[in-house]
Amino acid sequence: MSLATDKNHESQNFDTPLCLGTHQLESRLIVGTGKYEDFEQMRQALDLSGSSCVTVAIRRERLYDVHGQNILDFIDLDRFTLLPNTAGCYNAKDAVRTARLGREILLGLENPGADWVKLEVLADTKTLLPDPVETLAACEMLVSEGFQVLCYTTDDPIIARRLKAAGATAVMPAGSPIGSGQGVLNPNNIRICLEYLKDGDPDYPVIIDAGVGTASDVTVAMELGVDGILLNTGIAHAQDPLRMAVAMNQATKAGRLAYLAGRIPKRLYASASSPEEGVIGS
């Protein structure tokens, strides 16, 4: 297929939607709703991100701000599927309780996100790294209750494989610590996670969750072969969140298409791009 000769290439679909259990998302970028200057800025950023799914921290998020405004009034519930998350939980018991609360809230809103949850069980307040033991325990309990569980975890391939075996709908290794903006610190571990999780199951979703700080971080992550990106701080705390929302949107698409296209191999020496045969004067 030649894009140069196809006048309608912009309308063609070069990718498939992101499938997470029974949910199908047109965008591979999932964005958070916290840390914005105000709800209006959040609303604009969500729109510009191109995302079709936004995650809300049931335990931490302010339902109403200091002006009495409700966050849900600034989220288009017809456009966005809400993904409740258990941020702020430090043990399995609290995480399960929070997930149940999120389900009840979304059932009341008749939002299709009521049957899933982003599971986040943290080990401490300083590193915000996940507690692998409590995360695994919570995952098992939530799966038994019918939740589709998207698990935030470290980039440890063994834990990732255990979470999948426990029934996680998707495994979401961190690129680097939450809010750090360091990007993907250990791409080799992400590659091993992909190998372990997709062995015999190539469509199993793996999402980078946390740590990406700018568009190039997103593109690098997507070029590794992950299926999507979940981020919040990288947009909300950018100097210009609205411009960054556009950048993250485009970076997700570019990285994904580059991965599907297949990069050229890296070479030590140059390789001429023009034909070497039929050179004038030869």
Image: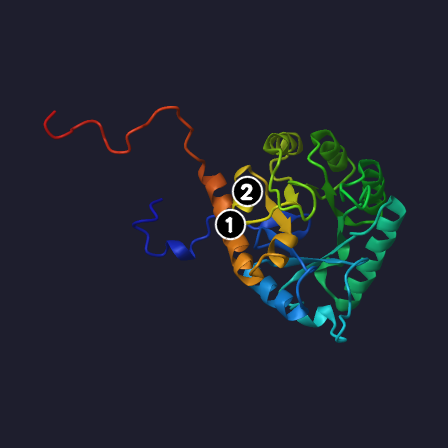
Q: Which of 68 and 97 is in front in this view?
A: 68
Which residue is farthest left? 281
Q: Which of 35 and 280 is in front in this view?
A: 35
Q: Which of 99 and 211 is in front in this view?
A: 211
Question: Of the residues shown, which amino acid type is indicated by label 1?
Answer: Ala
Residue 37 at x, y = what percent? 66, 65
Q: Name the residue under label 1.
A: 251
Q: Is residue 149 left or right of residue 45?
A: right
Q: Tell me whether the residue at label 1 lies in contact with that at label 2, contact meaning CB atoms closer than 8 angstroms.
A: yes
Instruction: State the SS at label 2.
Output: helix
Relative to 109, residue 220 above or below: above
Residue 63 at x, y = what percent? 78, 67
Residue 113 at x, y = what percent? 72, 58
Give the colour scheme shown. rainbow
Q: Is residue 78 left or right of residue 164?
A: left
**How packed is label 1: few (under 14 Cα within 10 Å), some, or many (20 or more)?**
many
Q: In this view, does 88 lie to the left or right of 267?
A: right
